[in-house]
Amino acid sequence: ASAAHISLNGETSNSPKLFVRGHHVARLDRLGILTANLNSFVPSDLITSIDKLEKRFGLEDCEVLIPALKMIIDKSSEAGIESVIMGMPHRGLNVLANVFYPKLEAADEGSGDVKYYLGMYHERINRETDKNITLSLMANPSHLEAVDPVVQAKTKTEQFYRGDTVGTPSQLFLKTEEIYLKSYLGINPNRKVCYRWFGLNEMDEPMFTQPLMNKQIRKQEHVLKKYADKLISEGVVTLQERRLLNMTRSVRRHTSSKDEKILHICHWLDSPWPDFFRPDGEPKSMSCPPTGVNKEVLRHIGEVACHVSFEAERIWLRNTVDWALAEYMAFGSLLKYGIHVRLSGQDVERGTFSHRHHILQDKEVDKRFCVPVNHLWPNQALYTVCNNSLSEYGVLGFELGFATASPNAQVCWFGDFHNTAQCIIDQFISAGKAKWVRHNVIVLLLPHGMEGIQGLEHSSAQPERFLQMTLIEFTGDFEVQQLYECNWIMVSGSTPGNYFHVLRRQILIPFRNPLIIFTPKSLLRLPEARSSFDEMITGTKFRRIIPDDCPASKNPEKVKRVFCTGKVYYELAKERKRLKLEEDVVIVRLEQISPFPFDLFKAELEKYSNAELIWCQEEHKNMGYYDEGVRPRNPVTQLATVVSRDPAAAPATRNKFTKIAELKRFLDTVFNLEAFRLS
């Protein structure tokens, strides 16, 4: 823009915009004193035009960062380091241009991000050692410190897959914003420390807020001049040679800026996943292999589980599978074929609700334990299960870093208080694919359900938050193509069999998108919430919608009401049976929320063309799946009646009697077959 539009006492001025050390001010006749005051302490020759100046982040007086990084890389290579991983808030462009040497320009793929937040992966010969060294710069969002645990995890992951237990083949390098902040505040600016000649960037004027400190900075000579003068004084170069070097460098940089750029944005990935995608970045196929497993494989896993858990043994003898056993079988079957499985979260080793028991502790010897899942097969992949601290922000960032490093791993995080990790969810998981074309295999297991007596925070996996950040998917192929096009997959399953299949599908599909599973609590031990052993064998798969097979489904033209629901199905089915309405009411379970199963949903509605459509959700009216998930994804559902709890600020009550009263009102409304409708 060439003009500033500033309202002053109700008047607007369109005077030319100027720059004062990178920060624009308006030259207004009514504000002439402002310009005069600025000029009184800022030299007039530093005022430049805005016409062709772009916002950028320079390294003026931090230039020593570049040779320092190069020296660290060279010395690391000499010491046997093969991989250097960096997290660089803000100054990524300088490191990209001077350390990685890329010739890259962002392609049209993805929504993109500001240039200095993009990452890079580059393998080159180290000049000092003639050895290959891999450099990886992680992309990071404006939440600058969020990249730190991701970098740490990527380093840990590379060590893990190399079989390294002491950390020798990888180098971790973190450049945190704290260092920059101290530099900007001018902590001991006269010492041999880095400081920024300008403010946050060249669009800022630090004199506005730190005039005394910046007066001292202005008195300093630039680092490059100090270094050049030292070389001249020591006779290393002459003044003429220095001038010639500057001219040569300027000509070379000007010429190289016109070089042909590489337009393949996939090369910007800090973890390129060799051989996983085609050269154009697309999946090698668009089909999903069957997720069912050979009966003998499942039987072997189940027998091992029976030695671990008496509860598993009781269920096994009844030829049924509960939630914990289905998970055990899914993990065990993946380990057999070389897929590393990692599960972390609050008390995941035993299960937060004492349902899992994946680690057996020695009752006599402290810290001596066994992980039975790691002894299922010869030469199987490793299963890692670890309790984490309740620092969800850092922990989820770490797990995300693990999930981005390799496509051949299933990384699951159980987040009882996931909302304290919202930054990682928003910046990396939801938007990472759109901004940076970053794929990852992360699975978020979020406990959810109106259990009531467990308290508000333990029902905090509010689906509407995730649906607000979800793409609305329209495509001709609803089975696989939708999964590829969405930014993440959301499932609210009601059966252990479906849980088994969705965990396996996450790895077997030929691409990677995050998976959000709203896991139940009350269903973990509910006798009705069991799956047959036959629901997981070869030939079976994940069911995006579970139709009803009650008596009413045999005469669809006579059905009076259709419910579409998820986990609350069991309470609805119990009440329907009590009221003897199996001939009048059908309960259809929507298991996959996103991508929305348009094809199956439409088929179910057409089957019961004479019925009234009711959307039932146990969540409050201002929460849950309907407004952000179901209603905008199918025009037919706009005609639905919504039955839910009354609007509320908190997701659940902790009072048992209040919970029971809410449930009774909810069920009474659902099964009122009169012309009662919620507004």
Image: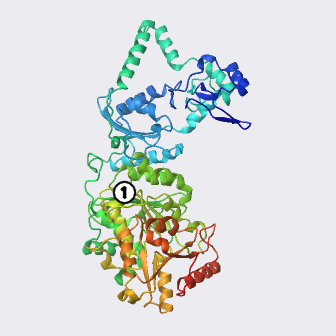
| Residue found 49% across the figure and 57% down from its top | 469
| Residue found 40% across the figure and 60% down from its top | 473
Amino acid type at circle 1 is Glu
- Asked whether 169 or 62 is in front, the reply is 62
* Quarter of the image where one finds residue 138: top left
Q: Residue furthest bottom?
A: 580
- The answer to whether residue 205 shows anywhere in this view is no
| Residue found 40% across the figure and 10% down from its top | 244
* Quarter of the image where one finds residue 603: bottom left
**Element type at mark 1:** helix
Up-down relation of residue 428 to residue 363 (above or below): above
* Quarter of the image where one finds residue 507: bottom left
| Residue 312 image offset from top left, x and y in percent | 40, 77
- The answer to whether residue 420 shows anywhere in this view is yes
- Asked whether 676 or 419 is in front, the reply is 676
| Residue 83 image offset from top left, x and y in percent | 36, 39
**The N terminus, quarter of image:** top right
Give the residue pinned by disc 1.
485
Up-down relation of residue 441 to residue 322 (above or below): above
- Asked whether 594 or 3 is in front, the reply is 3
Left or right position of 376 against 468: left
Q: How many marks?
A: 1
